[in-house]
Image: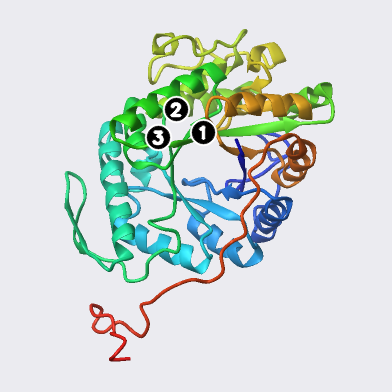
Amino acid sequence: MGLHIFWFIPTHGDSRYLGTAQGGRQLNHDYLKQVAQAADSLGYEGVLIPTGRSCEDPWVVAASLLPVTQRLKFLVAVRPGLHQPALAARMAASFDRLSNGRLLINLVTGGDRAELEGDGVFLDHAQRYEQSAEFIRIWREILTRSHEGDTFDFDGQHLRVKGARLFFPPLQQPHPPVYFGGSSPAAHELAAEQADTYLTWGEPPAEVAKKVADVKARAARHGRTVKFGIRLHVIVRETDAEAWAAADSLISKLDDDVVNRAQAAFARMDSEGQRRMAALHAGARNKAPTLGADASSLPPEGAPTSSGGRATFGRTRADLEISPNLWAGVGLVRGGAGTALVGDPETVATRIQEYAELGLENFIFSGYPHLEEAYRFAELVFPLLPRKLREKLPGPSLTGPFGETVANVFVPRAAQS
């Protein structure tokens, strides 16, 4: 299987050490451009641009990086509740056309209620997934029908459009591919029914296999097939000892208060995926538990991450290696993807291949700092992977409409032109 390898644009900040300003990078366009151009020249398929209130806006960032890259694809977020589906479809079509087909869509439902409420979204977990299902259905239909100039009506529980129409269709048909991640049953159902690629965060292979099997079975009931991918950090060095030393160094500036505050914030989220990430290390108290055979082994939603008072956090390899070479140290203070593959090039490549054998073909990696680690991973691991080499982008093949739309309704006919 040819693997699609992606990198990450750190629009929420970058550093040599987690949880401290020491070793931090100035987040400006020049630095983001360096990371994007490194990924482009090294042969990464594309880059994920994160979203949320702690990040620069992903659409603005992606658009700014288009003219300084050549073949790199951009996995950019749409967020139901913040975007309207018709506007999001127009944005996607414009970006796809102007980039010559370099757009991928990341459907983000969101798991931090405080953040969502700050953005004006007051739906609970179940309602957000209902809204997301309606959103992506409308988005897909508008883009798909744009190739024939058709309109679309939809009257749902959360969203409604009447006569939705897109005059300028996307280059990719029927629409740019949709990526989606989530760990709850509602998320799996949404992925099975609407997504092109299901993404998981870096859990142990046995747990990832369960997710793949569940989404695959749900998709089959809808008469669909879904591709699969994983989001991971990576710490690779020429020797295993050097890699683990680098992992220790990454969290060497952390103190208990920072970890406590981060874990308390994560515990307030209603994200099943974030809960599973936290369960992998449990704040690194003594010996970290793993996910176990079923959800009964997980702490309940909203459970505190320490047993009262000021916790003392162990940070040894034994505490945080929750599966061979899978390290949960990043998740002590980082929300979302919190695990990293750690080891020498051969070991990391072997672990990647183990995930690939479960049916995963899309791998989205990152490392701290992102510029240097993009080079390091490409130089050390790329030669060991069965990568899917990037296809040459097609030449311009856009078709009409030609001429200015009349009264915002009518497209000029050829005879009139």
Q: Are circles 1 and 2 on residues that touch, CB within 8 Å?
A: yes
Identify the residue at horizontal 77%, vertical 27% (top origin). Answer: 346
Give the answer, above or below, for where 256 lies relative to 379: above
140 relative position to 102: left or right: left
172 relative position to 316: left or right: left
**Quadrant location, the C terminus:** bottom left
Give the answer, above or below, for where 188 lies relative to 84: above
Give percent across and percent down for residue 258: 60, 27
Q: Amino acid at mark 2?
A: Gly
Of label 1 and label 3, which has the lower sequence position?
Answer: 3
Identify the residue at horizontal 36%, vertical 58% (top origin). Answer: 88
Where disc 1 sits, the SS reads loop
Q: Amino acid at mark 1?
A: Gly
Residue 189 picture quarter: top left
The image's mark for residue 111 is 3
Q: Nearer the viewer, mark 3 or mark 2?
A: 2
* Neighbourhood count class around disc 2 (C-alpha, 10 Å): few under 14, some 14–19, many 20 upward: many
399 relative position to 21: left or right: left
Where disc 2 sits, the SS reads helix
What is the spatial separation of the Cα atoms under label 1 and label 3, in whole angstroms?
Answer: 9 Å
Say which residue label 1 marks. Answer: 336
